Image (spheres, rainbow, N blue to C red):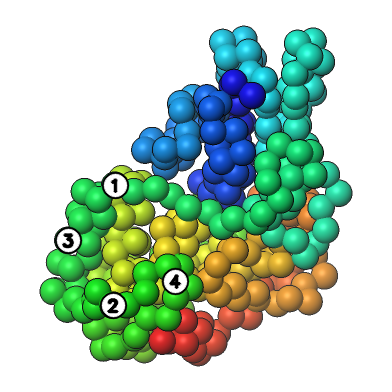
Amino acid sequence: MRRILLIDLLGGLGDLIMVLPSVHALAEAHPGAELTVLTHAPGAPLLARDPGVTAVRTAEEHDERAAVEQALADLAPDLVVTTTRFAGIGDLVDADARERGTRAVSNLWRRPPADELVGERYQRILAAEGVIADRIRPPRVVLTDDELAAGRESVVRAMRHRWRIHDSTPRGPGAPRPRSRDTPTVLVPDAGMAVKRWPARRWAALAATLPGPVLSVGPVDGAAELPPTDLRGLAARFAAVGEAGGVVVGPDTGPVRLAAAVGARTVALFGPTAASRYGLEEGTNLQGLPECPHREPTAITEQVCWWEARCPLATEPACLLDLPVGRVREQVVRTGG
């Protein structure tokens, strides 16, 4: 394999993070190959300094098929992997591979079980196709030392210098870290879709009951809001929170996945999406209303509540209302302890 093209044009930051383990697995399995990732512009910075990625190409929204056609023509890849099949992209990739006599894995969504995490499913399919090693990896975002230092400084300022970290503390994801009165919690209240948002009043109630400094990405009553930054800056801040033994709390959305991918502990709130399928590989996943009769774990876009955020069971999403403040607080304290 001299040239590999991975296509992820599903649209969300979280979607790109879920495919990162497959990106890194392909780089490991084919160390001499040039690996190009085609994705949407908002997520592209996450790959900018990744040693496993040779180049990043971006596609405009609603013009994805043309971007794929151009990438295939420019790169003439020996292997194409795509998470994306809309607009006939899967068929396009297959046809190109047949014409040139190369390899393509064009359907990473084939017959998905309801209880297998998406990112792990991708890897198992690619391993079965013989293009990566049969080993499950978690998502990882690569940051530079300068970025990590800047992230740490930003968090220290927001915490008003209540910073405590010991060099002997294990830093690996999931490693035990001591929680103290100086251990921060970062709240991420927003989500790209209204159907995924926990009520604002509950974020304020959670902030009021947590020990230690409470920070937020976006406004939350009772929390110190972190100043705006770009995507890599946010990742570096999350990494600093992880170093300090803190926890990042938020809905099933890209920023919480980003926090986990840089080593922070997380508590993710799942409402309309099934945590058994879309949960974070690392961290605590809280599922609201697990018995909801309208949830479709393997076909979330077909749910009655998905696009318009109209819950058939309540005026607000009943699944998220099923996650009370006390339950979330308990998991935050336990996760950071």
Q: Residue 304: x, y in percent?
A: 76, 57
Q: Secondary structure at mark 2?
A: loop
Q: Earlier in the sequence, mark 3 or mark 1?
A: 1
Q: Farthest residue toward the right?
A: 111
Label 1 and label 4: CA atoms lie apart by 20 Å
Mark 3 surroundings within 10 Å by alpha-carbon count, few (fewer than 14), some (14 through 19), many (20 or more): some
Q: Position of residue 308 (x, y in %)?
A: 65, 52
Q: Which mark is residue 144?
A: 1
Task: Give the foreground label among 2 and 4.
Answer: 2
Tell me where residue 109 appears, x and y as whole percent.
77, 44
Q: Considering the numbered disc 1 on the image, is that residue within a helix, a strand or a loop?
A: loop
Element type where label 3 sits in the image = helix
| Residue placed under numbered mark 2 in the picture | 168
Q: Which label is found at residue 72?
A: none
Give residue 138's quadrant in the image.
Answer: bottom right
Residue corresponding to mark 4 = 265
Residue drawn 70% across and 77% down? 289
- Residue 256 versus residue 122 in the image, above or below: below
The answer to whether marks 4 and 3 mark residues whose Cβ atoms lie closer than 8 Å is no
Residue drawn at x 31%, y 55% is 236
Spatial CA span between label 2 and label 1: 21 Å
Residue wearing tag 3: 153
Res 189 seen here: no
In the rendered structure, which disc, 1 or 4, sits on the residue that comes first in sequence?
1
Quarter of the C terminus within the rendering: bottom left
Q: Residues within 10 Å of mark 1 (few under 14, many from 20)?
A: few
Q: Viewed as shown, does residue 53 lie left or right of 29?
A: left
Query: Which of pointers 3 and 1 indicates the residue nearer the eye?
Result: 1
Q: Earlier in the sequence, mark 2 or mark 3?
A: 3
